[in-house]
Image (cartoon, helix red, strand yellow):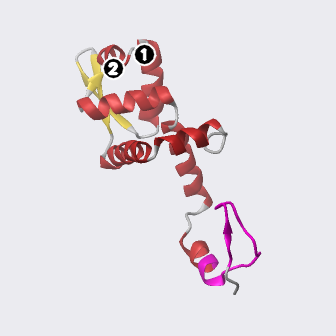
């Protein structure tokens, strides 16, 4: 085993493998299907329109399409389309009351993802923005 010097956090100056760490990663990594699901979830949450709607629901607890449109300034048709995707993916659930459907976050995991995402961005916004602008986050 070699001790490596990290250069700019992007690479090592000495090529080597740390077998114990590699074995741990292989043993504990999600399977390809789970990785695909995680990537799909982040892609779904990564759309600014859907993110705005989710944060509105997070704040209010439950909103209908009309309220979501008014609260976010997003057209009702766009809100409905986004909610259809979010509901199909299990991110939000709907409850019909008369002619309205009220949407809420499906569970505490979604709330945690949204809260942690906002906290992460607030912690170091220039780094997140810079990485996104340089195509390192979004491709």
Q: Position of residue 32 (x, y in %)?
A: 62, 59
Q: Is residue 21 placed above or below 10 in the rendered structure? A: below
Q: Position of residue 33 (x, y in %)?
A: 59, 56
Q: Residues within 10 Å of mark 2 (few under 14, many from 20)?
A: many
Q: CA distance from mark 2 to mark 1?
A: 8 Å
Q: Is residue 120 left or right of residue 12?
A: left
Q: Is residue 64 magenta?
A: no
Q: Residue drawn 43% across and 12% down? A: 75
Per the rendered image, the range of residues in magenta is 4-22
Q: Is residue 130 left or right of residue 14?
A: left
Quarter that holds the C terminus = top right
Q: Residues within 10 Å of mark 1 (few under 14, many from 20)?
A: some
Residues 51 and 107: in front is 51
Q: Is residue 26 placed above or below 129 in the rendered structure? A: below
> What residue is shown with label 1?
74
| Marks 2 and 1, the one that precedes in the sequence | 2
Q: Position of residue 99 (x, y in %)?
A: 27, 14
Residues 114 and 120: in front is 120
Quarter that holds the N terminus = bottom right
| Quarter holding residue 58 | top left
> What residue is shown with label 2?
68
Q: Is residue 113 left or right of residue 26?
A: left
């Amino acid at each position: 085993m070699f001790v490596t010097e990290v250069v700019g956090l992007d690479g090592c100056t000495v090529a080597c493998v740390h077998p114990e760490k590699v074995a741990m990663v292989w043993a504990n990594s999600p399977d390809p299907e789970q990785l695909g699901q995680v990537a799909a979830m982040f892609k779904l949450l990564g759309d600014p329109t859907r993110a705005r709607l989710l944060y509105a629901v997070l704040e209010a607890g439950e909103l209908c399409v009309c309220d979501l449109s008014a609260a976010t300034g997003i057209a009702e048709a766009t809100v409905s389309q986004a909610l259809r995707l979010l509901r199909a993916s299990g991110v939000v659930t709907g409850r019909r009351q008369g002619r309205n459907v009220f949407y809420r976050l499906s569970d505490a995991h979604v709330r945690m993802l949204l809260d942690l995402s906002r906290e992460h961005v607030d912690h170091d916004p220039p780094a997140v923005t810079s990485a996104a602008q340089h195509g390192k986050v979004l491709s």
